[in-house]
Image (cartoon, coloured by chain):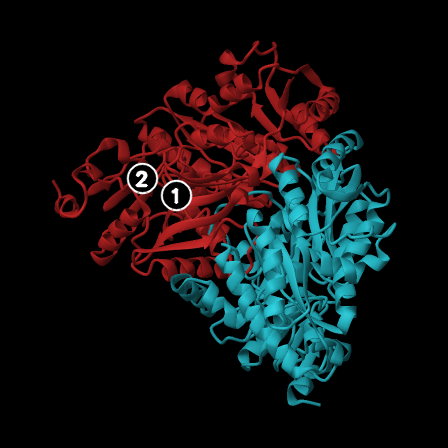
Chain colours: A red, B cyan
């Protein structure tokens, strides 16, 4: 039992403190690329006030604070390098729900899928649908500004946040924004906290904006022989002005890994998959779906309109796991490129893999130019992991050369820190560092992450 | 000729420098409440590089820099209190336009209405439609995070900004974001600059996201005998889940002021107007419009479906001017309340007017809970203006009591500075001040504004 654990037990309920060795709190989805951490204690606060109390205790004693959501991150943002892991998992309450005005206030530890189900029962819709939504938390989604397939039409998590409650240094509970839809009475601290990966403070609750639920979700899937035909189809959908809700792709490698469980099977020769979805009223979505079918037809091997949208998206959510299953591990990034450069991003990922002797593939949110560029690894093969790191260097350089970014939705975490320097111009980097010091002068909020 | 003007002429083109006494650059729409300023010189740069050069010159010599867009602000954000007015009006270029991927890059001095027209010619749509769009600039819209009627469905200006080019202290040209749709590779400096009213730097250009243009815009207007019936109708539209594009209101006073020019006239006894709009494909918008007509019918004096949407919105854009015309001046704020409190906000505005012996009215973006609460003044009546100031104190207290904000889209500018202290909790206020000092250690960017 560490001294920190013992001291925390002196003022917190016994059940609120776990040993620092609690394995479930020392890694996230980067475990599959070999990342793991260590902690002095794990705290599970039950309220914002208790969270503030723990932060104040840590801040006074120079103890690092590592906020943790569902642990589904791909950037090591939740991996602790000592200090106290602050898991929000017990803070799952709905503080208020006003379906008649399309608004809900929830605590940060609510699972994303639970939120979506709760509002759906009142005919409403929380659009963000990042992967692993059954496990990820609303707070974690906010901390990474998570995206997902439907971000193409509806925007990322931050677009749905009206206000935040958060604990800032040295342990102060504050509120920015609130139950209103517009507010310019100060600088936008809310957006500064969104996507800050727990490095500026701890989000404890959020006011969220909702929408009336679309009546139907009507997906279209189309298969192609390769990247050229598939990317041309993607460009046709956007170029003809079809306002689809989602526009996804899988390249040949991703399709080979995940295709075995694809509903109704994959046609012979398919090496590229496009998923587009029309939503809205039944009449409107059916009309749009027809236009999408037309736009996707040219050069395709098959175009289908699956009846069971939920089954399709469950399959889509499992792609990452299916790719991991190929070799037991993977290094997966989430670069962004301008939409018109997406074919170059997909081909470039494969070329980088070849250059470093790595099996590569990609899939992702085509409409947003957001590629999950991935290199397969065998767990424990240090030399292969080392080659992966060099491949990732090349991948980020490619994203920058194409005019994009090194992260669209996973964040920087621990794994991309070194690359942020190359990505951000010096003047911008300097401001970023000053903002971090302003919020966290002792560098105790999730140290070693983001920048 | 001031020394500053003379020195600026030494390195800038003669046509780029105007005397500080140039009246057109010393006020904005707050002139109607008596606000005016003074300047040492006015500079009209032709490029981002020239803007950076001017900022560097000013920053080195401790000369205040007051960025200026179209001068249509209602908060005095563009009113100079000495120093150099930096008007972006000559920077109107389209740097790149990629209609096939729904994206444009424009300089900050482009007029908002010009932007909307340019993209419309390619079948695209820039949704933000703040008032005075024929005069306001894209850069000014970004600096205030301007809203407008269609922000209810489409969000405010910031929701459409992919990236910014800006000049930061001490004269450095930087870019945050860019031609990509997602980016979490750093703290969200872009959102920090949006709505910062020129107090953190000068926006010189922006990458903007666009949408395929809706096929039709189908407005519905409904008249009621008073606030109770009108507000109930607003609640029915939202409560029955009708995803309208805009949801506006005018109270009795605003309707009396502007009703004379209302297309097809105002029915007898009308003391509250609701405008809702359905957009999208013709079939979809017609279906939604029918549901809106039903939702608005109960308790109404008349419900109409005007054929000429553009004429209706031109009239709506003139409401502010029509209210001013009543007495020659007005003090108009833009408080926000949670949507379910809107009747209290409207009635409360009138009650505050009565208390201070002022003629009051309100209109605004009902769906966003954003009220333009207004007190009429006679220009030059200092005693009346003084009573207005006290009424505004009460108005802001009301907005806070209802759980809202003191500004939804106009910003803080010079006129709400004193109120920001009461609105923001001390911890948040402290961070705001630190952010200002971080970006502008010499307090030269639009001093006396925002905070």
Q: Position of residue A234 (x, y in %)?
A: 67, 29
| Residue drawn 22% across the image and 58% down it | A60
Q: Residues within 10 Å of mark 2 (few under 14, many from 20)?
A: many
Q: Is A449 on the left-hand or right-hand side of B277?
A: left
Q: Residues within 10 Å of mark 1 (few under 14, many from 20)?
A: many
Q: Are marks 1 and 2 in contact (CB under 8 Å)?
A: yes
Image height of A375 relative to B401, above or below: above
Say which quarter of the image contains residue B71. Answer: bottom right
Q: Secondary structure at mark 2?
A: loop
| Residue drawn 62% across the image and 64% down it | B333
The residue that disc 2 covers is: A79
Q: Secondary structure at mark 1?
A: loop
Say which quarter of the image contains residue A307. Answer: top right
Give the mark, 1 or 2, whose residue is nearer the N terminus.
2
In terms of depth relative to the viewer, which is nearer, B203 or B435?
Answer: B435
Residue B134 visible in the shown view? no
Q: Position of residue A208 (x, y in %)?
A: 50, 42
Image height of B84 relative to A328, above or below: below
Residue B389 visible in the shown view? yes
The chain letter under disc 2 is A
Q: Is B180 on the left-hand or right-hand side of A20?
A: right
For residue B339, the mark is none
The chain letter under disc 1 is A
Q: Quarter of the image containing the N terminus of chain B?
A: bottom right
The residue that disc 1 covers is: A413
Q: Position of residue A153 (x, y in %)?
A: 62, 36
The Cα–Cα distance between marks 1 and 2, rounded to whole angstroms, is 9 Å
In terms of depth relative to the viewer, which is nearer, B311 or A380?
Answer: B311
Q: Is B154 on the left-hand or right-hand side of A413?
A: right
């Amino acid at each position: 039992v560490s001294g920190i654990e013992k001291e925390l037990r002196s003022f917190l309920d016994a059940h609120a403190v776990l040993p620092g060795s609690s394995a479930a709190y020392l890694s996230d989805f980067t475990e599959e690329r070999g990342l793991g951490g260590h902690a002095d204690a794990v705290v599970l606060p039950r309220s914002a006030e208790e969270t503030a109390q723990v932060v104040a205790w840590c801040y006074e004693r120079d103890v690092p604070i590592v906020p943790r959501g569902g642990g589904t991150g791909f950037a090591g943002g939740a991996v602790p390098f000592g200090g106290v892991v602050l898991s929000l998992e017990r803070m799952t309450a709905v503080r208020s729900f006003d379906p008649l005005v399309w608004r809900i206030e929830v605590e940060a530890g609510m699972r994303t899928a639970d939120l979506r189900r709760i509002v759906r029962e009142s005919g409403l819709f929380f659009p963000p649908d990042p992967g692993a939504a059954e496990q990820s938390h609303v707070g974690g989604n906010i901390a990474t500004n998570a995206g997902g397939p439907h971000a193409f039409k509806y925007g990322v998590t931050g677009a749905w946040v009206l206000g935040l409650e958060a604990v800032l240094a040295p342990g102060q509970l504050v509120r920015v924004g609130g139950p209103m839809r517009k507010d310019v009475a100060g600088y936008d601290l809310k957006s500064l906290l969104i996507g800050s990966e727990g490095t500026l403070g701890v989000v404890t609750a959020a006011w969220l904006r909702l929408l009336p639920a679309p009546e139907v979700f009507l997906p279209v899937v189309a298969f192609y022989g390769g990247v050229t035909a598939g990317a041309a189809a993607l460009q046709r959908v956007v170029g003809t002005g079809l306002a689809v809700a989602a526009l996804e792709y899988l390249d040949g490698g991703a399709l080979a890994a995940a295709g075995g469980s694809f509903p109704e099977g994959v046609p012979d020769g398919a090496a590229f998959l496009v998923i587009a979805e029309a939503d809205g009223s039944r009449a409107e979505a059916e009309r749009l779906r027809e236009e999408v079918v037309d736009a996707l037809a040219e050069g395709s091997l098959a175009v289908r309109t699956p009846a069971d949208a939920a089954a399709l998206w469950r399959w889509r959510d499992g792609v990452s796991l299916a790719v991991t299953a190929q070799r037991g591990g993977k290094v997966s990034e989430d670069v962004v490129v301008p939409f018109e450069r997406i074919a170059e991003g997909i081909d470039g990922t494969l070329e980088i893999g070849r250059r470093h002797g790595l099996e590569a593939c990609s899939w992702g949110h085509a409409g947003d130019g957001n590629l999950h560029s991935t290199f397969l690894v065998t767990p424990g093969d240090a030399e292969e992991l080392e080659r992966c790191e060099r491949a990732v260097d090349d991948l980020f350089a490619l994203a920058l050369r194409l005019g994009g970014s090194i992260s669209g939705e996973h964040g920087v975490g621990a794994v991309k820190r070194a690359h942020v320097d190359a990505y951000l111009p010096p003047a911008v980097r300097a401001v970023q560092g000053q903002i971090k010091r302003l919020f966290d002068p002792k560098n105790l909020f999730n140290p070693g992450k983001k920048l």
